C-alpha cells in the first residue's frame, strides 16, 4: 500500500522520478506484510483461537504497528499517507486473524486428521 503513492507520484528527486522506485517500495511493503502476518498466524495457531480472539490478536498486532510508527517519529499531520496505512493495519490485521482462526477451526474439526485415521499409506 505504501508503494501506490510512489507509483503515481509525478515528483522527481536527485536520483530520478519517484515512480521508478515503485518496485522497491512494493518489495519493502511485502516484507512489512510478511512479518506481522507471520506473527498473527503463529499466535492464532499456537493459541488455537476462535474467530473473536483471532480478530483481537490481529487488531492488536495492527495497533502495535501503528504505535511503532509513532515511536519512530510519525507525524499524522505531515505524513498522512503513512498514518492512513498505519490505521489500516488494525482492521486488516483483524481480518487476517479471523481468516487464520477459521482455517484453524476447520482443520481442527476433522477428527480423522487429528487421530491419524484415514487411508493407509503403502
Image (cartoon, rainbow, N blue to C red):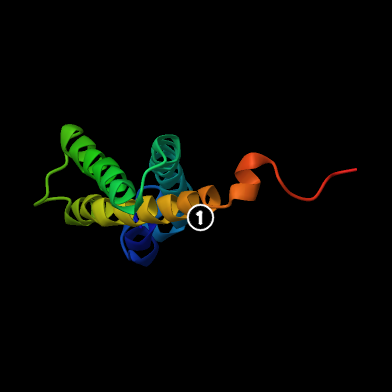
Q: Which residue is mark 1?
A: 106
Relative image position of residue 23 (x, y in whole percent): 49, 54
**The C terminus is located in which quarter?**
top right
Left or right? Give the position of 18 relative to 105.
left
Of the pair 33 and 96, the residue shown nearer to us: 96
Give the answer, above or below, for where 12 lies relative to 38. below
- Tell me the quarter of the picture where residue 19 sits: bottom left
Q: How many marks?
A: 1
Relative image position of residue 53 (x, y in whole percent): 29, 46
Relative image position of residue 25 (x, y in whole percent): 42, 50
Give the answer, above or below, for where 24 lies relative to 95. above
Relative image position of residue 34 (x, y in whole percent): 46, 43
- Tell me the quarter of the picture where residue 41 sits: top left
**Picture residue at 44% right of the left edge, 37% below the top:** 42
Left or right? Give the position of 41 relative to 77.
right
Of the pair 65 and 105, the residue shown nearer to us: 105
Of the pair 25 and 35, the residue shown nearer to us: 35
Give the answer, above or below, for where 85 lies relative to 70. below
**Picture residue at 40% right of the left edge, 41% below the top:** 44
**Mark 1 crowdedness (10 Å alpha carbons): few <14, some 14-19, many ≥20:** few
Amino acid at each position: 500500500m505504501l508503494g501506490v503513492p510512489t507509483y503515481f507520484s509525478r515528483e522527481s528527486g536527485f536520483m530520478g522520478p519517484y515512480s521508478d522506485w515503485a518496485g522497491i517500495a512494493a518489495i519493502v511493503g511485502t516484507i512489512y506484510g510478511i512479518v506481522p502476518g507471520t506473527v498473527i498466524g503463529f499466535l492464532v495457531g499456537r493459541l488455537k483461537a476462535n474467530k473473536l480472539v483471532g480478530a483481537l490478536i490481529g487488531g492488536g498486532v495492527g495497533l502495535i504497528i501503528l504505535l511503532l510508527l509513532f515511536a519512530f517519529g510519525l507525524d499524522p499531520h505531515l505524513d498522512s499517507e503513512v498514518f492512513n496505512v498505519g490505521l489500516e493495519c488494525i482492521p486488516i490485521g483483524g481480518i487476517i486473524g479471523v481468516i487464520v482462526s477459521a482455517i484453524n477451526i476447520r482443520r481442527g474439526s476433522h477428527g480423522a486428521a487429528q487421530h491419524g485415521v484415514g487411508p493407509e499409506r503403502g
